[in-house]
Image: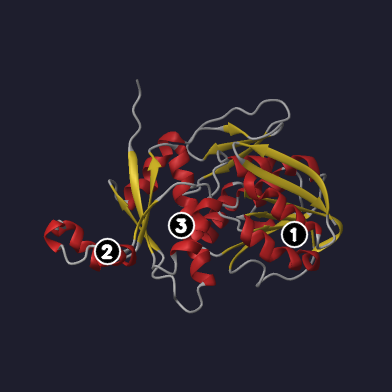
Amino acid sequence: METTNWTQVDIFTTTVGLEPVGAALMDVGFPAFAIQDAADFEQFLEGKNGHWDYIDDDLMKLREAETTITVYLPDNQQGVDGLAAIREMLLRLKGLDGESLWGRLECQLTGVQEEDWAFAWKKYYKPVKTGERLVICPSWEEYMAGENEVVMRLDPGMAFGTGTHDSTRLCLGALEDVVTGGEAVLDIGCGSGILSIGALLLGAGSAVGVDIDQVAVRVAGENAELNGLADKTQFHCGDLAEKVTGQYDIVCANIVADIIMRFAPDVPRYLKKGGHFLTSGIIDARADEVLEAVKAQGFTLKSRRDSGGWVALLFVL
């Protein structure tokens, strides 16, 4: 019987930050996690009525411990995607925490060095067909394209977007349905650049990608070059569309529910009439919430795709 190794990921925050960080973790697919909070332990001590001799010295150290949320990642492709999602989530939370109330919002891996993790994921990453036509192939793998197949060469590094995560595959499948040729695409939260590059390989004319993570922006540019598409792409580091101008035929946002709803009122400004807004990174429990928020901006739902507890919604303006 095959065993699974696990890597512990400790996320450092504050008592005030527990709620927003916990909610964000659930939105990126981590419904269960452990919490260590010194404030909770102080409440416990207050209830001991002075009987301190019954408290272990190791427990007493919790009084000085930094508030931590802990999750565990399996040693497989799911874990690789999970770590990338956590890193991006923390960057976005830092951008929202203007008063620095939620602590340092950093993570630490136990059981593996992060630089080792950055290379270990490659053993799980193999060519994968994401729809009827598009095949995602690691840059170091060989793949013979079949009839009507389009091959994307990809080296995602530590950026989110390998083509294996349900939310990414749902988006790529939807792009196959809406890209007919020559479209201008805006990709919010571009990660590895997988949606931008996928759209171009399917026939779109140009793509602009934005991500809050500078590493992702660099990786996306490298992947565009890898596919011979550097002249058709632009990638920017920033929050949502703050550095974007113009209008587009397709706007993609494979992020999380709260960020999609925050961005929804701005989408019509960047989308041509009759254009498509493709959203994913949404857990099924929040799909209706996102649906109503986007429809309130004048959009009509064109299709919904579900896979593995994740949802992609395609709207038309």
Q: Residues within 10 Å of mark 1 (few under 14, many from 20)?
A: some
Task: Tell me where residue 304 sits by quadrant.
Answer: top right
Name the spot of residue 171 as percent of width and height, x first.
68, 44
Above or below, 200 against 124 in this view is below
| Callout 3 touching callout 1 (CB < 8 Å) | no
Q: Which one is nearer the viewer's eye here, 178 or 301?
A: 301
Q: Residues within 10 Å of mark 2 (few under 14, many from 20)?
A: few
Q: Earlier in the sequence, mark 1 or mark 2?
A: 2
Give the labeled residue for mark 3: 87
Q: Earlier in the sequence, mark 3 or mark 2?
A: 2
| SS category of the residue bearing label 3 | helix
Q: Earlier in the sequence, mark 3 or mark 1?
A: 3
Side of 198 relative to 28 (left or right) = right
Q: CA distance from mark 1 to mark 2?
A: 45 Å
Name the spot of residue 32 as percent of width and height, x first.
45, 46
Figure quadrant of the C terminus = bottom right
| SS category of the residue bearing label 1 | helix
Give the labeled residue for mark 1: 293
Name the spot of residue 193 as percent of width and height, x first.
60, 52
Give the labeled residue for mark 2: 47
Residue visible at 39% across and 63% down? 106
- Amino acid bearing label 2: Gly
Q: Which one is nearer the viewer's eye here, 30 or 139?
A: 30
| SS category of the residue bearing label 2 | loop
- Amino acid bearing label 3: Arg
Name the spot of residue 129 as percent of width and height, x first.
62, 32
Side of 189 relative to 204 (left or right) = left
Q: CA distance from mark 3 to mark 2?
A: 37 Å
Asked if residue 215 can be seen in this view, the reply is no
